[in-house]
Image (spheres, grey):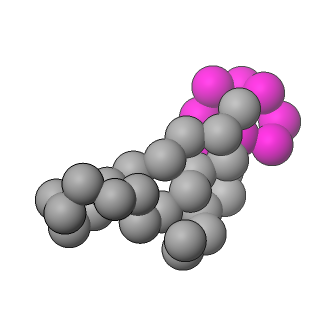
């Protein structure tokens, strides 16, 4: 699962969150 977050409200994704073990909780984040 991969999710994206807009942290500064400009309408563009800033951070990509990844759930590598499938437990429903993001366990990795990387800047876009």
Left or right: 25 with respect to 15?
Answer: right
Magenta stretch: dominant secondary structure: loop
For the magenta stretch, what is the residue range? 19-26
Residue at point 34%, 59% (across, down):
12
| Occupied quadrant, residue 3 | top right
Residue 20: horizontal and vertical position, in percent? 80, 43
Query: Is residue 15 left or right of 29 when viewed as pictured?
Result: left
Q: Residue furthest bottom?
A: 31
Quarter in which the C terminus is drawn = bottom right
Q: Quadrant of the N terminus?
A: top right
What residue is rendered at 63% in x and 25% in y? 24
Give residue 28's quadrant in the image. Answer: bottom right
Q: Residue 16: x and y, percent?
A: 56, 56
Residue 22 lies in the magenta stretch = yes
Verify whether residue 18 appears in magenta.
Answer: no
The answer to which of 9 and 18 lies nearer the viewer is: 9
Q: Nearer the viewer, residue 31 or 20?
A: 31
Q: Position of residue 9 (x, y in %)?
A: 16, 59
Name the side, left or right, on which 32 lies relative to 14: right
What residue is drawn where x is 39% and y is 51%?
Answer: 5
Q: Is residue 19 above or below residue 1?
A: below
Residue found farthest to the left? 9
User: Is 26 in front, or is 1?
Assistant: 1
User: Between 26 and 7, which is closer to the camera in this rendering?
Assistant: 7
Q: Seen from this angle, which residue lies furthest right?
A: 21
Total numbered labels placed on residues in the image:
0
């Amino acid at each position: 699962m991969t999710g994206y977050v807009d942290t500064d409200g400009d309408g563009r994704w800033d951070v990509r969150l990844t759930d590598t073990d499938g437990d429903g909780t993001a366990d990795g984040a990387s800047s876009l």
